[in-house]
Amino acid sequence: MRIVRVVVVVLCLLELAALHATIFGRVQGVVHDPQHRPIPAATVTLKAQDSDWTQVQKSNDNGEFEFSAVPIGNYTVTVMVEGFQQQELTLLVNSDTSPVLHFELALAGVAQKTVVTGEALEAPTDSVTPTTTVSRLDIQDTPGADRSDSMAIITDNVPGAYMVHDMLHIRGGHQFSWLIDGVPVPNTNIASNVGPQVDPKDLDYIEVQRGSYDAQYGDRTYGVFNAVPRTGFERDRECELVMSYGTYEQTNDEINCGGHTQRFAYYASINGNQTNLGLETPTSQITHDEANGIGGFSSFIFNVTPRDQLRVVASLRRDDFQIPNPPTVDIGQPFPYSPETLVVTPVPGAFQDDTQNERDGMAIFSWIHTFAGSHNGLLTISPFYHLNSSNYDSSPDDFPNAVTNHRSSSYAGGQATVSATVANNSFEAGFYSYWQHDNQLFGVLFNDGFGPPIQDTEIVNGNLEAIWLGDKFQPTPWLTLTGGVRQTHFGSPTVTENPTSPRAGIAVRVPRLNWVFRAFYGQFYQAPPLATISGPLLGLVNTPGDLVTPQQFIPLMGERDTEDQFGVDIPYKGWALDIDTFHTKSQNFLDHGNVNYDFDGNLVSTNIFFPLTTQFARVSAWELTLRSPQLWRRLQTHLAYSNQLAQFMGTVTGGLSNFGFQEGWAPLDHDQRNTLTVGFDMRLPWSSSLNGNVSYGSGFSNGAAGGFPDLVPPAPEYLSGHTTVDLALSKSFRERFSVSINALNITNSHLLIDDSLTFGGFHFNDPREVYGEVRYRFHY
């Protein structure tokens, strides 16, 4: 049966005439003489700034040119016409955008050629999606960002993005999509993985989209991470060795090699990491917190013909974590921690020796075909396979209970898309599908004498198919109308859903000011996890008692979101300011909760966590990003700010029902009103640089405020704010050798930032860390 499903998916992909990988944009332009003199065809060269990727073409009789299938990144466009000055423009290409460049020619001087350099800094009118794009140089220079398990390149640049209980949250949620080369990597599980999807050192660019998505983006409302892996076009039979060492015996090491010819490019890496400070600790003391990982990554590109390209991306990772030892909280005792200091009080005799072991592997194959003709069509077919596992294990001697929670999920499917330009319309259509197989094991040993051991194995299958249509209509250069619809079918043994998700947007450029105003309305559907409960474990969650709300497992439903968003892009003399406000309303909001049971009149918590859906949730925010040009040829700065409110209301509509009806709106456990990051990149003499980042959070929702309403004095609604300062000083010795010193949280601001009962319990932020890094390049 499994083979039949996979064959059906592959046949559907092959039958669909699909065209447009989301990793690509287009570059269009026109060359003209302001004096209306006849000019010969121009030679136009498009070259990546960070690699040897190059395309060359001639302009047509009207001076027009267009490059299709341009990967995300920074480029230089050079125009050469005999008898005229050579001109250059630099620009950033984002996915699904078509920047239009204008070159006004000027006669060349006698016996000389003048090069005119500028930047194409107009805000795009062909997209309503707020986007942040960072390069591999940003990843290398940002303090701590190139470590294997780091999300700093996102949290330091994206408004409303932060880490809490060891998980990335963005825009009020913790569900986001990873795309590799424009192909989604499916993972429907919530709150089960803390390891990285990809080592940041293996990325060329990462494009973060924040809401207002086209119809081709389907199942994650809060963020889309379009990752462009390194390809080898930036290498010529060259390897790079990266080694580091620092406090808490941390090390992040990698060797990567790559090269290319005119038709073929390859890149491969092996990396390893280790630290004694792996996860956020539940107290200020750091014990039982080792983490280590190893991984491999590869990318291959082969240009079969000028119009056909084959891509293969594969990775395999293993990450192992010790769960930091908390003084286990007995929440049946009256107020187990002080409201003034929020210090956890240990339960006598409590002991934990828990570990989390994760595995992740993926393989993505893509065929990209460019169609001849005037409609600039692209064909992309991308079958994929993804395997993800998360195994939580306790020592058999743990008290009061020892927990086993194993999950393995495999996904087989593919994506196919089609796009073409007709007149002022850019049409797109696509198909996305996968078949999912989950194998889950739950078990508990009751070392407190509560009852005999229990164990439950669940093997569940599911499938998802989605088809979408979309159009961007640009009647004038200053106005773009976008629209589309996505139809999804999700099926599992307990749930079948067929949501329809319409999307619509508008972008308008104000003449002379060049400000671009945008608005968006859309609906989204997020497929639920396949997790379920049956057998003896149902008896545990339904244990009667004065302290336990009767619990049951309700089939999980998919999350349905409605988003409206308004924003404006303001370019000014190289500065780029983006302001937006959004409001997201959710039904069946995906979250997670743990299993509790009653023993001798006390409520005892386990580390078994199950996904659940809350009846209603809402997220509202104002966001701002600001990026400067190069100041004094040495300094560039950036800023990201969010004022956000994330709340829920109602009852549990799916998953483990372990609390009653919530009357009125209450903050989600990861709600934080204000977040601000300010960073800078300063080029210093002697081939050195200083990079820094200051991050501020106003404080997360205080679980004590709602969990212990009778406290005197009452607990504050939010925990205290926190600020961290990170710095990195680096120096290059010629082109092959560089060293850097990274200092994270240099003020050692170490305090409780989260007291929600989630993965691992209470959480303090990471203390000060200092490490050195060496990079060495060599040819082979």
Image: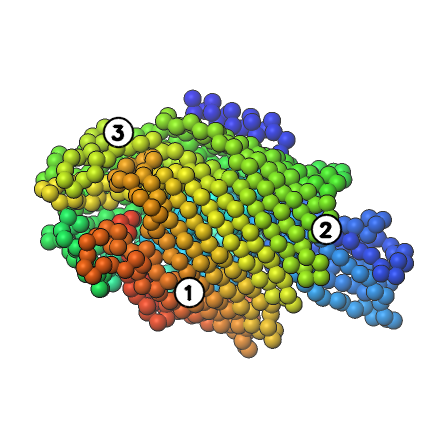
Q: Nearer the viewer, residue 64 or 518?
A: 518
Relative height, residue 87 to residue 387 (above, below): below
Residue extending farthest right: 37
The residue under label 1 is which amino acid type? Ser
The numbered mark, 2 or 3, whose residue comes first in the sequence reads 2
CA–CA distance between discs 1 and 2? 39 Å
The answer to which of 227 and 762 lies nearer the viewer is 762
Place residue 114 in its image quadrant: bottom right
Q: Position of residue 398 (x, y in %)?
A: 16, 46
Q: Residue furthest front?
A: 664
Q: Which residue is mark 3?
A: 534
Marks 1, 2: nearer the viewer: 2
Within 10 Å of disc 1 (Cα), the crowding (few <14, some 14-19, many 20+) is many
Residue picked out by circle 2? 477
Q: Residues within 10 Å of mark 2 (few under 14, many from 20)?
A: few
Q: Secondary structure at mark 3?
A: loop
Answer whether residue 704 is visible to the viewer in this image: yes
